[in-house]
Image: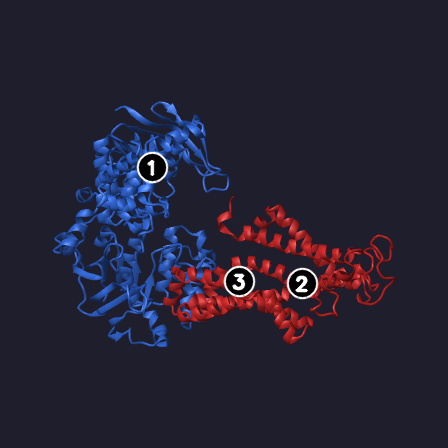
Amino acid sequence: MSELLGLRSVSVRLPPNADRPYALENVSLSLGRNEILCVVGESGSGKSMAASAVMQLLPANVTIDAGEILLEGRNLCAFSDAEMRQVRGARIAMIFQEPMTSLNPLLTIGDQIGEMFRIHTGLGRDEIHARVQDLLKEVRIPDPERAAAAFPHELSGGQRQRAMIAMALALDPSVLIADEPTTALDVTTQAQILALIRDLQKRKGTAVLFITHDFGVVAEIADRVAVMQHGRLVEEGRTEEVLKAPKHPYTRQLIAAVPPLKAPPPRPISPETILGIENVSKTYASGGFLGRGRRVTKAVDGVTLSLPKGATLGIVGESGSGKSTLARCLVRLIEPDAGAIRLAGRDLVGLSREEMRAARRHIQMVFQDPFGSLNPRRTAGQLVAQGMIVNGTPKAAALNRAKALFEMVGLDAASTERYPHEFSGGQRQRIGLARALALEPDVLVADEPVSALDVSVQAQVLRLLAELRQRLGLSLVFITHDLRVAAQVCDLVAVMKDGVVVEQGPVGAVFGSPRHAYTQALVAAIPGRDFALAD
Amino acid sequence: MTTLRLFLRSPAAIVGLVLFLIVLAMAASAGWLFPKDPLSLAGRPLIWPFQNPRFPLGTDNSGRDIAAQIFHGARYSLLIGLVATVIAIGIGILIGAIAGYYGGWTDNILMRVTEAFQTLPNFLLLLMLVAVFGSTITTVTIAIGIVSWPAPARLTRAEFLSLREREFVQAGRTLGLKDARLIFGEILPNALPPVIVYASIVMAVAILLESALAFLKLSDPNIASWGNLIGLGRDVLRVQWYVSAIPGVAILLTVLAVSLVGQGLNDALNPRLKGR
């Protein structure tokens, strides 16, 4: 294998007030021609910093301390700014996680791709236009003429990422760095983009440095894989070897934390229904003046589901399927337009604001974002005690009970005095869980409770959730986009698309032999499915 | 504590703080250094500064001690600035919070009212209020507060609009918290930092507004405010310019101090600048 890009014992120093002295410590990597190397690791592992180091685009105060970065044998660290500008875009191109923020919202897609040629080449206008069209065809954007004239917000997320890839490939770079390019995309779109990157790489012979946190993606796309932890490279090797026979304990732990797609044997389900969702609909209308040009979106359209007592009902779907709207309708954070939500036989939709406030303690919610769902100005103990105090528990008793709850969710009872920012993401999600459990609800609605967490932390939180469900006899509505997680947690599952439930049933049956075409597409799009099934 | 440390890291903020403390010290020591009524006749009119050791800053056209008026004036300027700011920020927060939290019709109506206030030049509105309600120090202060609330209201509303969608607010709602508790207990503490910073601008403007009123001889004539002294000096501006210039400099330094402190607070409270 001939090396194209190489990192030789690279160390990147962080500013003195950071949580560790080095972002990268003695990292050596080698990317050969015509291969895809996946750098995989959890947040804070330094994988993105490695990409920034190669591009010489490190944040201020962060410097390369030792080692060299070689592009075809020439050390990039010794390049001047002007020389580096010749390399960026032309020799090494980069695509990012969120194409919307990487594209200029005020320029058309065609202009932005054309800019690459205007900066780096002396081509004329017509020539540039033709090249842009070729590129857009190459990344298989539907209707390239229209896409070139469109502004970023007029394209879907997947199309934007295609446009970004077209821009990155404009000057035929020898290296493409992809920093979590599919993380913000839905699973079916992700599968298409991964196939596209794989295909382009084959045809053009570009070397790809692919940064990801997802072992499924690794299994799908990588030739070789490098595993990083705390800024160090812990394991490197051919993909099959690393996935099948990981040597380093950290790699083993990471791979073990990826939930398998195969559901565990079904649990007995109680015949008694605790939460009945009957024909719930929510419609949003936007724009329009005096009824003209009004756009009506049916976010949730006549959904009927039932949650047996003590069971877990999963609601899965891609973004825009209405699953989060439905979750918020259940706790009446959003008022449904029609239908009934019966909690232990009592319809919540008909309740007045005052009655609803009293009924809320029976149905509680856990939120997705462990950063946004805790008020930064209250201590963790206050956050957990708040609900009990509102519902009439004396303050001292509530704070004591908060301590007990902290222990129940696996946190140190002494840490109730600390503020949310002093906790890690997984710990914050535990606080959120303790807050919801404080009121001893009958039903817990969890909206993507683990999707913002690293895979090993995710596994811990899921284990905690399963244990609490068993111990407290909780009934759970579990919203997720991740079919692997759903397979492990849920007894029953409902698949939503465009506000409608297209398929529902026991999780083993729905994922094992999906009947609806959309469910089949979803299951087929899961990256690295075979790798998980083989495990 | 970290906020204080960050605040003290900026040299401009320290200059502002020192200037502000000097003005505060002047206000505090006025009664002790100049026990007599600053508006009483003290000597020959129009003595230039540094000529008579009894009057280090000279006397004005009626023979009153300018130094005494500057020291006592610091009290009035700070008092007017502070009280007017509290009024303006109080009204602003209340209206902005309600408009931002409830949205919809409530927001529409409250914002139209705010815009009505904003489209009128606030000095004209102030003149009108003073003309109708008279110009005692109380009415002048309240009037300044009343014309200054729209900007803080808009700022608070903007903060509320983004914060009310945050998950911790929704979490509070699912726990059964009442609206008032959500507005004042959960959202407001998070919305406050930019409003506090803006308060320093409101205070600087309030001091200037009072001076402008006094310059037109429309402020309370029975107090020794800096503005009154400037207004008095207007008659002798071409020859004895110092009568207007000395209180002018005092106002300039006070407004500068307040703005620098505000700037320092902004840098210290703005999390994006932290660790820079």
Q: CA distance from mark 2 to mark 3?
A: 20 Å
Q: Specify how the rendered protein is coloured.
A: by chain
The answer to whether marks 3 and 1 mark residues whose Cβ atoms lie closer than 8 Å is no
Name the mark on residue A400.
none
- Mark 2 or 1: in front is 2
Q: Residue at x 51, y 68 (%)?
A: B116
Determine the chain carrying the residue at label 3: B
Determine the chain carrying the residue at label 1: A
Local packing at callout 2 (Cα closer than 10 Å; few below 14, some 14-19, many 20+) is some
Mark 2 vs 3, N-terminal side: 3
Rendering coords of residue B270 (x, y %): 51, 52
Q: Nearer the viewer, residue A35 or A474?
A: A35
Q: Nearer the viewer, residue A354 or A155?
A: A155
The answer to whether marks 2 and 3 mark residues whose Cβ atoms lie closer than 8 Å is no
Q: Amino acid at mark 3?
A: Ala
Q: Secondary structure at mark 1?
A: strand
Give the residue pinned by disc 3.
B151
Q: Spot the red chain and give its letter.
A: B
Give the residue pinned by disc 1.
A94
Q: Secondary structure at mark 3?
A: helix
Rendering coords of residue B63 (x, y %): 84, 63
Q: CA distance from mark 2 to mark 1?
A: 58 Å
Colour assigned to chain A in the rendering is: blue
Q: Amino acid at mark 1?
A: Met
